[in-house]
Image: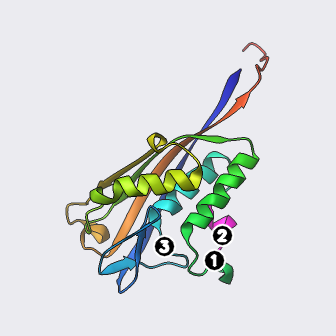
Amino acid sequence: MSFHIRTGFGYDVHQLQEGLDFWLGGIKIPHTHGALGHSDADVLIHVICDALLGAANLRDIGFHFSDKDPKYKGIDSKILLREVMQLIRGKGYEVGNIDSTVCLQEPKVNPHIPAMKTCLAEVMGVAEEDVSIKATTTEHLGFVGKKEGVAAFATVLIFKKQGMIAREPF
């Protein structure tokens, strides 16, 4: 038995705006500002979706869930993540691991990481140990440091089990 392994990368930013709910990693975090977007603007789920789709060569989140389509207005990003998992599993892939970083000046993300890991693992049907979430500030630099926005990055490894494949020598 052999494994076909692929990696993917995701990056996203959202503007922060006063009075909006702040969704991150599938959970609502208490804060005066929330991310602005067509959906619930969960930047962490969006980067994970992009990384998974890219790894499976299925384009990106905007291709599958256009912000021009009114049916996605205000949608819970966990629904999008479930659909992405169906797409990659439809091609025979499973998640090996996810490594992500959220860049946010405030609120502090670290106290919420365990709940986010639990939520994301449940939505994707993977083990919590396969979901890594890290958080950092930008030391008051740039739009994140000025508390104007949130950014996130994710890398993923997906794999497909395959029978032994005979290969021609080089």
Per the image, label 1 sits on a secondary structure element best described as: helix
Quadrant of image for the C terminus: top right
Circle 2 crowding by C-alpha within 10 Å: few under 14, some 14–19, many from 20 = some
Crowd band around label 1 with a 10 angstrom C-alpha radius: few (<14), some (14–19), many (20+): some
Name the spot of residue 54 as percent of width and height, x first: 62, 51
Q: How is the image coloured?
A: rainbow
At x 28%, y 58%, the residue is: 111
Identified by mark 3, the residue type is: Ala
> Do the residues under discs 2 and 1 have CB atoms within 8 angstroms?
yes
Choose the circle earlier in sequence order: 2 or 3.
Answer: 3
Where disc 2 sits, the SS reads: loop
Q: In the drawing, does residue 113 fall left or right of residue 57?
A: left
Of labels 3 and 1, earlier in sequence is 3
Mark 2 → mark 1, Cα distance in angstroms: 7 Å
Residue nearer the viewer, 58 or 84: 84
The answer to which image quadrant residue 66 occupies is bottom right
Residue placed furthest toward the top = 169
Residue 65 seen in render: yes
Residue at mark 3 to residue at mark 1: CA–CA distance: 11 Å
First in residue order: circle 2 vs circle 1? 2
Q: Residues within 10 Å of mark 3 (few under 14, many from 20)?
A: many
Residue type at numbered disc 1:
Tyr
Q: Is residue 64 magenta?
A: yes
Q: Which residue is mark 2?
A: 65
Give me the disc on residue 72.
1
Q: Which mark is residue 41?
A: 3
Q: Quadrant of the N terminus?
A: top right
Residue appearing at x 55%, y 45% in the figure: 126
Residue at 58% x, 76% y: name it. 75
The answer to whether residue 135 is above or below residue 132 is below
Q: Which residues are magenta?
A: 60-67
Among all residues in the image, which is located at the extreme left?
139
